[in-house]
Amino acid sequence: MNPLSRATTTLFEAERLRDQKLINGARNRVYYALYQAVMSVFEIKYIKWNDFDTNASRWRHDIIRNNLSHQALRLNRQHQEFIKAAEGKRVTADYTDGFMCTAGEYSKLVAEIRIATEILEKFKQDIAIP
């Protein structure tokens, strides 16, 4: 089984929500696709949440956010910052009512999904998933 299948499915959901111009839902799914991908790569490399925080009982957003520079992920600085920004956009999307889908926001979302796809593809190559 592809360990990144959950992240891939979540990113697919983001694309469908984007197509329906449901920006908030799409931004939520973009972030969670990246969160799931990072978590999967760590686990494939036998790295667990308690390797970063001995008091943690599960993966948390702060553990992911604070460890994006870990050598196991091999993320460049731009991708690290993109994932952090995606989390912020997810929080805004989840807690903002009545966000309007403007052409500008739609264009930004298209670019965000493209970058998230690049990151997932990079992870697939790094862990040798066809």
Image: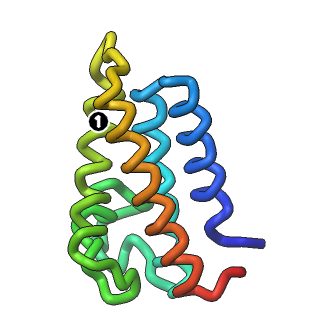
Q: Nearer the viewer, residue 119 or 108?
A: 108
Residue at position x 61%, y 35% in the image: 16
Relative to 126, 102 lies left or right: left
Q: Quadrant of residue 95?
A: top left
Relative to 10, 32 lies left or right: left
Q: In which quarter of the image is the C terminus?
A: bottom right
The relative height of residue 103 versus residue 110 in the rendered view (above or below) is above
Q: Is residue 31 visible?
A: no
Total marks in image: 1
Q: Nearer the viewer, residue 92 or 121?
A: 121
Q: Mark 1 points at which residue?
A: 91
Q: Which x, y percent locates residue 3?
A: 66, 71
Q: Which of 14 and 55 is in front in this view?
A: 14
Relative to 9, 57 lies left or right: left
Q: Residues within 10 Å of mark 1 (few under 14, many from 20)?
A: some
Residue at position x 21%, y 75% in the image: 77
Q: Nearer the viewer, residue 23 or 57?
A: 23
Q: Can residue 100 be seen in this view?
A: yes
Q: Which x, y percent locates residue 23?
A: 42, 28
Residue at position x 49%, y 77% in the image: 122
The relative height of residue 50 versus residue 111 in the rendered view (above or below) is below
**Element type where label 1 sits in the image:** helix
Q: Which x, y percent locates residue 78?
A: 24, 69
Relative to 99, 42 lies left or right: right
Q: Which x, y percent locates residue 63?
A: 30, 64
Q: Quadrant of residue 44?
A: bottom right
Q: What residue type is labelled 1?
A: Val
| Residue occupying the far right of the picture | 1
Residue at position x 31%, y 49% in the image: 86
Q: Quadrant of the N terminus?
A: bottom right
